[in-house]
Image: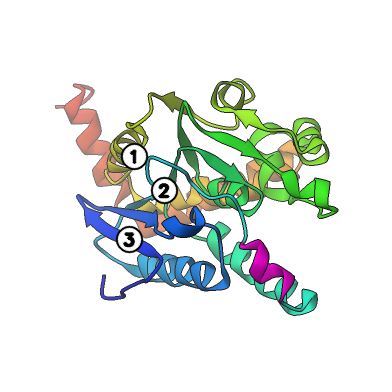
Amino acid sequence: MAAEFKFLKVRIDKGVALVTLDRPDKMNSLSMAVRDEIEQCFTSLETGKDVGSVVLTGGEDTFCPGFDIVEVMNVGIEAFTHRILEYHLNIYGFTKPVVAAVSGFALAGGFDLALCGDIIIVSETAMFGHPEIRFGVNPLLSPLWRKVGLSKAVEIAMTGEMINAEEAHRIGLVNKVVAPGGVVNEAFEVARKLTKIDLRALAAVKRASMVAPRLDIEAGLEYEFGLSASIFQESNLKSKVEAYARKIGLIE
């Protein structure tokens, strides 16, 4: 990966891109420059043939407390809102699988960033929340309700209360909780396994996870079978199925 970043560390290992937020003096808060680098990084990784999956993390101490508040207060709201919309559309539109590795705070915009993880692995220290509601700013519901359902998402957004790692796992917000100091390694192992799976199939699952929840069962099935048909036409599926059948002894 040729690009160099000021606020991100990027390392590619065994087909996994490890992307680490690196703004320690501000607890990895999301300034405009940080958001721009995240977008640039994801754009580059999207087309990188040596990358099959991504781990997104803030390291073992803290993930991200949200936007840089001082900067937000000095930016025109119309320009800010438009730019933030583009940013979110880009990170949620990334087609390769993302495993978020979260320690410490993931709040407000940092919470939203963690939710771009298709799989979320957290440390026991992780804390999620939308405290911005208490300042009169409405949190984003769209990314959250896909993880926990509409009723719970509304509760989280309206109350602004903190959610610890155990509760986050109980409500289905995160996939796994690990001991402090081990979240990045665990996320990397999950991401490494994903690199062994066909990217087109993974992208189809990811796309369906965004589209299917807003469809009725009939429309949802039609949409997903349409994705399957396009994959069948593009890939050497038959040879893969035959190889698997031989491996498990179904055919000789």
Q: Is residue 75 above or below residue 167?
A: below
Mark 3 or 2 closer to N-term? Answer: 3
**The C terminus: image quadrant:** top left
Can you see residue 141?
Answer: no
Q: Earlier in the sequence, mark 2 or mark 1?
A: 2
Instruction: Report if the CB atoms under discs 3 and 1 are less than 8 Å apart.
Output: no
SS type, badge 1: helix
Residue of label 3: 9
Q: Position of residue 136 (x, y in %)?
A: 85, 53
Q: Amino acid at mark 1?
A: Val
Which is more toward the observer, 208 or 107?
A: 107
Separation of marks 3 and 2 at Cα, in angstroms: 10 Å
Q: What residue does disc 1 label?
A: 184
Could you tell me which quadrant the N terminus lies in? bottom left
Q: In the visual, does 119 lie left or right of 9?
A: right
Q: Assess whether mark 1 and mark 2 are in contact (beta carbons under 8 angstroms).
A: yes
Contact, mark 3 vs mark 2 (Cβ under 8 Å): no
Category of crowding for the residue at label 2, using alpha-carbon neighbours closer than 10 angstroms: few (below 14), some (14–19), many (at least 20): many
Q: Position of residue 8 (x, y in %)?
A: 38, 63
Query: Main SS type for the magenta part?
Result: helix
Q: Amino acid at mark 2?
A: Thr
Neighbourhood count class around disc 3 (C-alpha, 10 Å): few under 14, some 14–19, many 20 upward: some
Q: Position of residue 169 (x, y in %)?
A: 56, 24
| Spot occupied by residue 124 in the image (x, y as percentages of width and height) | 47, 26
Of 10 and 245, which appears nearest the observer? 10
* Start-end of magenta stretch: 68-74
**In the rendered image, which residue does mark 2 sit on?**
57
Q: Is residue 72 magenta?
A: yes
Residue 65 relative to residue 73: left or right: left
The amino acid type of the residue labelled 3 equals Lys
Q: Secondary structure at mark 2?
A: strand
**C-alpha span from label 3 to label 1:** 13 Å
